[in-house]
Image (spheres, helix red, strand yellow):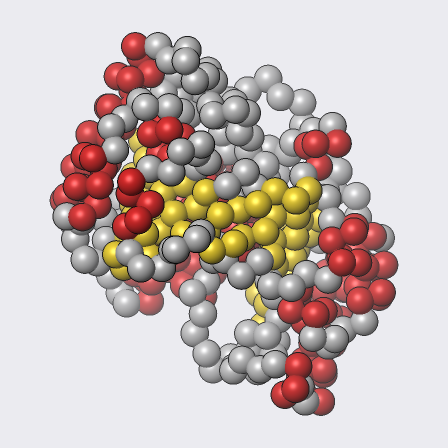
Amino acid sequence: MTTGIGIRTAQARSERLKGQIHVYDGVGKGKSQAALGVVLRSIGLGIHTGAQTRVLLLRFLKGPGRTYDEDAAIEALQRGFPHLIDQVRTGRAEFFGADDITRFDKLEAQRGWDVAKGAIASGLYSVVVLDELNPVLDLGLLAIDEVVQTLKRKPEDLEIIATGRGAPQPLLDIADLHSEMKPYPDAGHGMEGIEIYTGSGKGKSTSALGKALQAIGKGISQDKSHRVLIMQWLKGGVGYTEDAAIAALHQSYPNLVDHQRCGRDAIVWRGQQQELDYIEAERGWEIARAAIASGLYKTIILDELNPTVDLELLPQQPIVQALLRKPRDTEVIITGRYKNPPAYFDLASTHSEVFNHKHYAEKGVDLKRGVDF
């Protein structure tokens, strides 16, 4: 959880037991990736603690016959963690609007919702992802009142994640968390393979974890080894469940995932930077710079680089130069909030700003290991 600029360690936190309803919407990229990131962290924590975490991925409007960005990530999850993930896809294989709705679309939406209702009532799942539920409701393919009432009656410990554009107000009214992904102004004209996730809302680092899964899954489908580096700044402490998620990936895909972390086990406040903060930030950048130049990695995640630069712990120009010289087929994912936009923002071809409209932490609800941190 971000406080000010620094990142608060996960140690010594009380944890909530009650599951929450998460809604990710907006026209920006990262919604489904964020959901998959939560899934990975939940599974990783389950493996780490010995408690079985079972997940249902119910994907509306994504019928067979079309390839989607998250398909590869889901394949990596299913191969790596068999018996923990169930997937159901419904709908047509092409896009359509309100004027093109057919009886088949309504039947497919209802089929998916019948599966969802059974899964929610069963108590068998820890996490249920309702991918693209928002546009299904917006198109009127399901009765919003029935959906809302079913979600309100969910088992107490179940996490529900709904994604997609156009979340209707009745769903937002019962949501405990609402993050909206918006395209950053003037984004989309930069270099292919540079993505940035910023903003105050939840979903930045979790979207990056989804990208790591996607890279590994694409390698599997192409019979190639797509290596991933996850470099984290301002996270020098212990107790973050990214560790459990990454350890789970190591267990299933040895030699594909490298993880490095730098920083103190403390919040770094503006104007109170210590010498060690500069040393640790530079140490992390040297690792990242060499990785970008090497061409050994398919995907490199620079988690919390933005606040590190914003705190002036790293200069901007070396980062700009390293990104300009990156290999064409290397993806670089940069996350974190900021006060002053750094120069490398202009290089991104994808830039989503995550807006926080609602978060249960603001109501005093404890965070949950494996979902929130």
Q: Residue at 84% of width from left, 66% of height from top?
A: 146
Q: Residue at 68% of width from left, 32% of height from top?
A: 361
**As drawn, 203 above or below 189:** above
**As drawn, 106 above or below 307:** below
The answer to whether any part of residue 210 appears in the image is: no
Image quadrant holding the C terminus, namely top right
The answer to whether any part of residue 358 appears in the image is: yes
Q: Nearer the viewer, residue 251 or 63?
A: 63
Count numbered badges in the picture: 0
**As drawn, 271 above or below 306:** above
Image quadrant holding the N terminus, namely top right
**Residue 57 position within the rendered picture, expressed as x and y whole percent measured from the top left:** 59, 61
**Residue 225 position within the rendered picture, expressed as x and y whole percent measured from the top left:** 25, 56
**Residue 166 position within the rendered picture, expressed as x and y whole percent measured from the top left:** 65, 64
Q: Residue at 72% of width from left, 82% of height from top?
A: 106
Q: Nearer the viewer, residue 121 or 345?
A: 345
Residue 340 falls left or right of residue 12: left
Q: Dividing the picture into quarters, in which one does residue 12 lie? A: top right
Residue 311 falls left or right of residue 16: left
**Residue 249 position within the rendered picture, expressed as x and y whole percent measured from the top left:** 40, 45
Q: Nearer the viewer, residue 20 or 257?
A: 20
Q: Residue at 85% of width from left, 59% of height from top?
A: 149
Residue 170 falls left or right of residue 229: right
